[in-house]
Amino acid sequence: MLAAVVDSPGRLADVLAVREVEGPPAPGAGEVVVRMLASTVNPSDEVTVSGAYGTRTSFPLVPGFDGVGVIEAVGPGVPAAALGRRVLPLGSAGAWQQCKRLDHSWCVPVPDDLPDDVACFAYINPLTAVTMVERFCRPGVRAVVVTAATSVIGGHLAELLTARGVAPIGVVRGTPGRTVAEPSRWRALIRTDEPGWRERLRALTGPRGIDVAYDCVGGEVGADVCALTSADGVLVHYGLLSGRPLPARCFTEPGGPRVELFRLRDTVHGDGRRHLPELFAPVFEQLRRGLLRTAVSHRVGLSALAGHLQAPAVGHRSGKILIEPQR
């Protein structure tokens, strides 16, 4: 079968190769083989391939955390009714190959009314956004800031927050050609490439400061947002797009806000696999209503993925790549 393989850590476009590999062996007890139907590329894939999570990542590696497939073989102990069922195959990377072998307990059934090109995006961004809003946006929260507001997950957060009557303030880099998906959902957008952006953010949030900040940037931008967060507020740090961690002062400054390090992996792996369908239920409901959708910029067969990632225009796309593993 075809698989996208990374033999050693590095920049995704530089180290990814698509090649023929041995297909998965027959599933063992409690296991299934899933034929992948669709997948996508996320920043979490690029961070993993870079080697940032060295303690839990081994190479060679087949990347891909997001994807949907259909169960085409079952091992002993797996109900025969599972055959032919569309699922999200979770628990590990490996969506960028034509077939993935895994324990059936990691398979989340996908509702029949969600097409493949919607279901394949259900995991990383929508589940993160839904979980963080439910966990941290409590009643009474009014001043909310979202960094990397032009990102897909930034748009998801704005969609969920406005449904609760909270219009967030977005922080963006001001990258040419990058805009938020729906400007009406944002109270204001602050560009960090413009002088005085911290003062404008302070003026917007008022003397009380930020109630909740959702930060996936880190570095000095994350630190500046943290400094403007109320002492009884919370900064939810869930990504590292800057490549730099939050400075130590964010955690040690007297009178500073609570800093929560949110990792979706902890929620999924720590929730107990029997609860996975329940965890995804609100995500599927939002998708069914046409919310938390992800724009697709390109549809790429797995065989063409490496070349597509090397194309200069990929870094400026306005939507996600949808990978079709069977071609």
Image (spheres, helix red, strand yellow):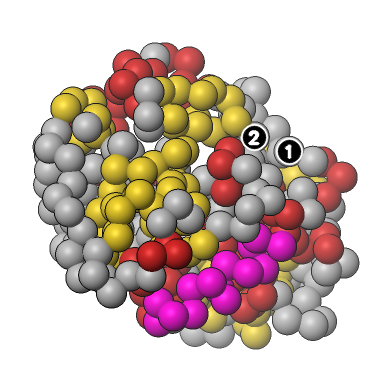
Query: Magenta segment: does it hold 276?
Result: yes
Position of 221 compared to 59: left or right? Answer: right
Amino acid at circle 2: Ala
Q: Which residues are magenta?
A: 272-285
Nearest the eye: 43 or 119: 119
Label of residue 295 in the image: 2
Nearest the eye: 193 or 111: 111
Nearest the eye: 310 or 232: 310
Return the disc, 2 or 1, that comes first in the chain's sequence: 1
Closer to the observer: label 2 or label 1?
2
Question: Which residue does the image show at 25% across and 54% down from the upper left?
Answer: 101
Q: Is residue 321 visible?
A: yes
Residue 95: image location, x then y, percent: 35, 45
Q: Are marks 2 and 1 in contact (CB under 8 Å)?
A: yes
What is the C-alpha distance between the residues marked 2 and 1?
A: 9 Å
Residue 286: image location, x then y, percent: 72, 59
Mark 1 element type: loop
Image quadrant containing the C terminus:
top left
Question: Which residue does the image show at 57% across and 76% down from the upper left?
Answer: 278
Name which quarter of the figure residue 310 lies in: top left
Residue 111, placed above or below residue 116:
below
Question: Which residue does the image show at 73% across and 81% down from the upper left?
Answer: 138
- Disc 1: which residue: 181
Position of 290 compared to 293: left or right? Answer: right
Amino acid at circle 1: Ala
